[in-house]
Structures are given as structure tokens and as C-alpha cells.
Image (cartoon, helix red, strand yellow):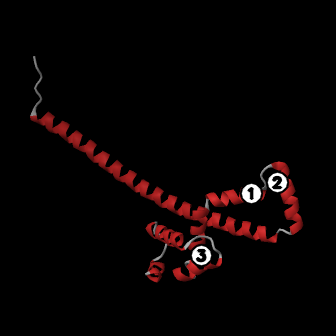
Amino acid sequence: MWFFPTKKEIKKELKKIAETFQYQREELEINREQIEKLKEKVESNSLKIATLEGSYLVLSQKSQVSVSSKSQESLKKSQAVSGQGLETKLIQRIKQNKKSLIMAEIMKLLPSYSVIEAFDIIVKQRNLCSKASFYRYIESLKSQKLVSNEAKVRLN
């Protein structure tokens, strides 16, 4: 004895399936919105990190300039004893994070300077990177939408 479902039962089951699909679509849309919010937070945090690293670079450069010759000699002696000194570690960290540090410097300059003026400061005055690298960093900032339209117009 076989059980044959009626049309009413089939419609009821199809309705349950349709409701399940609708629920899944709604969940997917919620997840997409959450992913977009997380992407925005990541971009914001990466900008903040780059800014902090840039500040760190500026502070470390100021501290290197203010070190007197006597303290440099004592620093060299302590480096010889301990292996790697603070200065060496700072230089290694800066080299590893050079791109983000330069991009943070560019972001600091762009609100008040044009791209060409920022180029003069970063490349010619401070000698932080080459011309090609500078414009690659600008393109990277444009692609991340961290450079305003005003800066884009100034570039072109």
C-alpha cells in the first residue's frame, strides 16, 4: 500500500521549501551587509595603522637627530655588547614597513598640499622614495579611495 500525496499536501510542502529559500536569501543579504561593514572597518583601521606608523617614523627620525655624539658612542658600545641596538631594530622595522609609512606621510600632506607639492616634499626634500614609487603609492591610495577627488584632479 503506497502513499500518494494529494495536491494540497504537495502545495504545502512547496510552500515550506519556498519559505526556506526566502529565509536563506535574507540571511545571505544580512551577511553581505556585515561583510561590507567589516571591509569598511578594515580600510579605516589600515589607514589608522599607516598614520600611526608614519608618526612613529617621524618621531624616530627626530630622536635620531637629537642624539648627541657622546650618546652615539655609548650606543655603539652597547650595540657591540648586546648584538643589536635599539637604533638597528628601529631601522629594520622602518625598512619592513616603508610603504605604509610613506603612504601615511602622503595622506598627511594631501589635505593641505597638491600631489605635486607632496611629491616635492616626499621625494625631493625628504628623499623617502623614488618618483615612480611615489606615483605608485598615489595610485594605490586612489584605488583604496583614500585620496579625495580634489587630489585626483590635481594629479591629472
* Label 1 with label 3: CB-CB less than 8 Å: no
Q: Which of 122 and 52 lies nearest the eye of the viewer?
A: 122
| Horizontal relation, residue 51 to residue 90: left or right | left
**Residue type (three-letter) at the residue carrying disc 3:** Val
Ranked by sequence position, the earlier of labels 1 and 3 is 1
- Which residue matches tag 1? 88
Point out the image quarter for the C terminus: bottom left
For label 2, count other residues whose C-alpha is less than 10 Å away and answer few (under 14), some (14-19) or many (20+). Answer: some
Q: Residue at x 23, y 40 (%)?
A: 17
- Which residue matches tag 3? 123
Ranked by sequence position, the earlier of labels 2 and 1 is 2
Ranked by sequence position, the earlier of labels 2 and 3 is 2
Residue 126, quarter of picture? bottom right
Residue 90 seen in the figure: yes
Residue 114 seen in the figure: no
The relative height of residue 75 versus residue 20 in the rendered view (above or below) is: below
Q: Residue at x 59, y 74 (%)?
A: 108
